Image: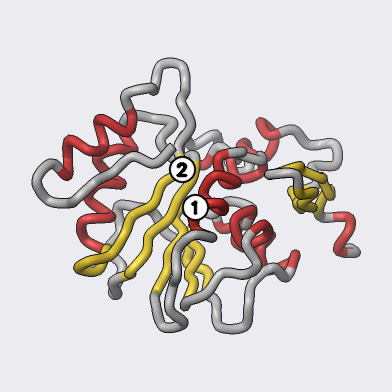
Amino acid sequence: MSLNEIYDLKKVICNGESIPIKLPFLKKNTLEEEWQKHENAHDFFPYWMTLWNSVFGLKSYLETIQMGPKDKCLEIGCGAGILAQVFPARQGDWFFSDLIFESLKFIQKIEVMKPNEKLICGSWSQRFCQEFQYIVASDILYESKFCQEIATFVWNTLAVGGQFIIANPERTGRDDAIDELLLYWKGKYHVEQIQ
């Protein structure tokens, strides 16, 4: 199978710049058929195969941060590697993680990672054996149950003085997601909202 048979190339305009994005090519399959490969297990719906637009806000914000070459950075819920695709100027020691193994295989195939970067297959309920100066994510608060899991994961994984940066759009029925997440951290972290 040639590389162009595994992805569709989309052009997205962000801040006046045309950015090419590689998304998984479904052929005849639908997202529901991909989900059936995991016996319709709730946590394995293939959201990773979709372009989530808040990643562009995350990219724009990350471009304002001076990350050092030795800073450890973790993206949780990396999906199809959109952040890695749109933010090639990233500095630091990057790790990209997702629960769904197929998403990580896709990232490997499209060759978007730098030689020192790593992929991690795992969930937010697991403990990682290292701490990160930066944990980043976009579009991950689409269900209430994730708030406590993410809060606990970040609490256990973020280095002292580190930053958790999340780009999360407003969603009907989930407008309180960020407030709910912040409740878990009240008094533990300095938090500021960036528009």
Residue located at (45% from left, 37% from top) = 168
Earlier in the chain: of badge 2 and badge 1, it is 1
Foreground residue, 109 or 36? 109
Looking at the image, the residue that sits furthest to the top is 173
Residue located at (30% from left, 52% from top) = 125
The type of residue carrying mark 2 is Ala
Residue 159, compared with residue 46, is above or below; it is below
Residue located at (89% from left, 63% from top) = 1
Which residue in the structure is indicated by mark 2? 167
Give the image quarter of residue 76. bottom left
Residue 63, compared with residue 38, is above or below; it is below
The crowd level at tag 1 (other Cα within 10 Å; few <14, some 14-19, many 20+) is: some
Which residue in the structure is indicated by mark 1? 61
Q: Indicate left or right for 194 with 179 as reference.
A: right
Which colouring convention does the figure follow?
secondary structure
Query: Label 1's element?
Result: helix
Q: Indicate left or right for 69 with 28 as reference.
A: left
Residue 72's disc is none
Residue 41 picture location, percent across and down: 49, 37
Residue 129 picture location, percent across and down: 28, 74
Residue located at (28% from left, 43% from top) = 192
Can residue 65 be seen from the camera position used here? yes
Do the residues under discs 2 and 1 have CB atoms within 8 angstroms? yes
The type of residue carrying mark 1 is Tyr
